[in-house]
């Protein structure tokens, strides 16, 4: 691995997907750096459209790209729309990565997900576990697209000498999250369910599955900080995990959210909904060895996310 520091100062930095939860956190974090921020609305460049992406890159010539644009969703959305999750993500990655090469982008950071690792990988999951076993079926389509993105970065590094890196976060949460119950991830769903039950004086909320799966949650502002750190400090074909260091069962997470929201009712389970993978705790030792660790604890992070959810509704 190269230990050269890549300097962001004075560079034109494109955040692809700036309206999403991750992209908007990156925009907030990059505002602290001495770089010029570039964004593209869907009307300016639909990232699934190769001609539009190539045109936009020819005009704007970003020197750095953070590829945070993706079709994302929770377990049910992944399971219901496999074609969208596979096609949209493949197109976005292929178009942006090839455009970055064509137009001489000096550094590109691709965002993956912990679901790229095998369903029954040894825990915590080291980067080397990639492609060592079958995937979790509920999100294999999304995972295959994200694995293709990692492989594109590795292939472009090998064939073209491009400094393209890949970063694997666990489940993310924070401001700008999706609170639509049919398509969201678990944490925003629990916040909304507990809040609405509290307001309605309901006696119970219902969660999906058994409540036993374990998940690791990282605040999106920690991820954005890690990405800025890695843009400057990491240059290697090996994807790198950015984790929170611990996981929690969905049942315990529900209790924590209910406590923060102030909902004291019962928790019921809907066994017709999928549990997904039993556990996906990332091994973040590579990242720690570089000198980066997360700062936002889960309880504090959920309290802030809940506050911004309430403000958003007001
Ligand atoms: O966050 P989540 O949708 O996705 O669900 P995954 C995590 C766990 O929470 C599952 C349970 O065991 C769900 O059954 N759960 C309980 C709920 N109640 C709810 C609820 O009301 N809504 C939701 N959404 N879940 C996704 C992948 O997997 O994680 C993506 O599908 C991506 O590809 C993302 O990797 C980070 O953690 O199971």
Image: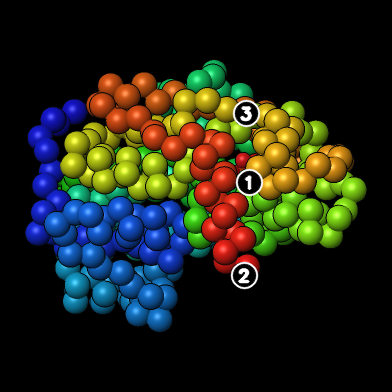
Is 227 left or right of 3, judged from the image as shown?
right
- Residue that badge 2 annotates: 314
- Considering the numbered disc 2 on the image, is that residue within a helix, a strand or a loop? loop
- Residue density around tag 3, few if under 14, some if 14–19, many if 20 or more, within 10 Å: some
For the residues labelled 1 and 3, the Cα–Cα distance comes to 12 Å
Residue 248: mark in rendering = 3
Q: Picture coordinates of residue 215 (x, y %)?
A: 60, 33
Earlier in the chain: of badge 1 and badge 2, it is 1
Asked if the residue at label 1 sits under 8 Å from ligand 1, the reply is yes
Name which residue lies at 54% across and 58% down. Answer: 308
Counting from the top left corner in percent of width and height, residue 7 is at 11, 47
Quarter of the image with the C terminus in it: bottom right
User: Looking at the image, which residue sits at the far top?
Assistant: 122
Which numbered disc flags the more N-terminal residue, 1 or 3?
A: 1
Compared to 165, does 199 lie above or below?
below
Q: Secondary structure at mark 3?
A: strand
Q: Indicate which disc residue 187 carries.
A: 1
Cβ atoms under marks 1 and 2 closer than 8 Å: no
Depicted 266 relative to depicted 74: above or below: above
Callout 1–callout 3 Cβ contact below 8 Å: no
Residue farthest to the bottom, as pictured:
43
The reply, left or right, for residue 6 in relation to residue 89 is left
Q: How is the image coloured?
A: rainbow
């Amino acid at each position: 691995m190269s230990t050269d520091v890549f300097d962001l100062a004075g560079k034109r930095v494109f955040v692809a997907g700036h309206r999403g939860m991750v992209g908007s956190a990156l925009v907030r974090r990059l505002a602290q750096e001495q770089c010029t921020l570039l964004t593209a609305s869907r009307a300016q460049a639909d990232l699934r459209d190769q001609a539009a992406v190539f045109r936009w890159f020819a005009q704007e010539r970003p020197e750095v790209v953070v590829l945070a644009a993706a079709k994302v969703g929770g377990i049910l959305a992944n399971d219901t729309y496999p074609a969208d999750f596979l096609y949209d993500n493949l197109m976005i990655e292929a178009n942006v990565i090839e455009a970055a090469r064509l137009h001489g982008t000096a550094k590109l950071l691709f965002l993956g997900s912990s679901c790229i690792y095998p369903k029954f990988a040894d825990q915590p999951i080291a980067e080397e576990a990639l492609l060592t076993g079958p995937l979790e079926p509920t999100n294999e389509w999304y995972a295959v697209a994200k694995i293709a993105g990692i492989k594109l970065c590795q292939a472009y590094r090998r064939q073209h000498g491009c400094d393209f890196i890949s970063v694997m976060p666990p489940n993310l949460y924070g401001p700008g999250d999706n609170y639509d119950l049919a398509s969201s991830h678990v944490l925003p769903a629990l916040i909304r369910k507990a809040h609405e039950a509290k307001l309605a004086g309901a006696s119970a909320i219902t969660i999906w599955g058994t409540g036993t799966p374990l998940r690791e949650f990282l605040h999106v502002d920690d991820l954005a900080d890690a990405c800025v750190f890695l843009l400057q400090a990491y240059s290697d074909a090996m994807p790198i995990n950015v984790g929170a260091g611990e996981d929690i069962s969905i049942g315990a997470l529900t209790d924590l959210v209910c406590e923060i929201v102030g909902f004291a009712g019962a928790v019921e389970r809907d066994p017709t909904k999928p549990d997904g993978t039993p556990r996906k705790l990332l091994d973040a030792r590579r990242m720690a060895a570089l000198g980066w660790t997360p700062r936002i604890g889960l309880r504090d992070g959920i309290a802030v996310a809940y506050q911004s959810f309430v403000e958003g509704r007001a």
